[in-house]
Amino acid sequence: MKVILIAAITLCGRISPATMGSQEDRQLLERMRQETDASLLGAGTLRDGDPEMRGPGGVLFADRLRGVVSGSGDFPWQKKQLFCKGPVPLIFTGHELVAELGGRFGDRAEVVGLTAGPGGLLLAPAFAELARRGARRVLVEGGGRLNHACLSQGVVDELMVTLCPFLSGDRYAASLAEGSVPLGDPFLPCELLAVRQGEQGELYLRYRVKK
C-alpha cells in the first residue's frame, strides 16, 4: 500500500482556512481522489466542514472507501453529507467505543476498533483494514493532528503540499502537522520529488518521506 498525505498550506505553514486553495488546487485534490482507492479524515475536519471526498466533476465514487479517525467519537454527523450520500464510511475509533458508536450510527457508518498507544490511536491497523478491503493507494486528507499521528507513526510514504501565496499569522490556526513531540530528532527528513508553479502563484510540491 502507498499512503499519500495531501494538504494546502500558507507561507507560514497553516492549513486553515481550508478554502485558501485555488480552483487549480481543488482540481488536483479531486484528481488525486480519482487516482486513489480511499481517503482518511480526522474528526476535526468533519467538525469544521462537510467533506464528501468527491472526484472530478463532483463525482461521488460508489466503490471508493472513506474513513474517519476519531479517538472520542464525539463529532457532529447527523446532517453531514458523508453519512447521507455515497458508500457507508468507516469510523476508526478505540476498541472501547465500538459498541457505543455502532449503536449510535446504525447503518449510516461501520465502526472499526483500533488499539490506543502512548500518543493516541495506532493507525497502522486502520490502513491494514483499508488494504484488506482492496485499497492500494490511500489519500490522507487530515487536519494537523491526524497528519502528525500518521507521520509520527511512519505510515506516510509521500507528501503532496500546495504552498499558497498567503500569510496567516493566526497563532490559533492549525498547522500542517500538530503534536506534542517533534516528528524527528529534531526533524523528519523528506526528499523532493517534484515541484511545479501554478497559474495563481502556488507551488505544487511532492516529497518522499525518508523512513
Image (spheres, rainbow, N blue to C red):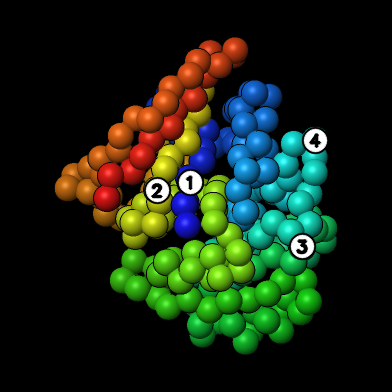
Q: Decide if residue 54 is in sight here.
A: yes
- Kind of residue at badge 3: Pro
Q: Residue 157 — which label?
A: 2
Indicate the quadrant where residue 56 lies: top right
Q: Upstream in the sequence, badge 4 or badge 2?
A: 4
Q: Residue at x 49, y 68 (%)?
A: 128
- Kind of residue at badge 2: Asp
Q: Nearer the viewer, residue 34 or 26?
A: 34
- In this picture, is 101 found above or below 124? below
Please name which of the two marks, 2 or 3, marks the residue nearer to the observer: 2
SS label for mark 4: helix
- In this picture, is 162 found above or below 84? above
Q: Residue furthest left?
A: 185
Where is mark 4, residue-wise? 57
Mark pair 4, 1: CA separation: 22 Å
Do the residues bearing badges 1 and 2 touch, measured as CB atoms within 8 Å?
yes
Residue 109 in the image, given as x and y percentages of width and height: 72, 71
Q: Residue 87 — which label?
A: 3
Q: Nearer the viewer, residue 31 or 76?
A: 31
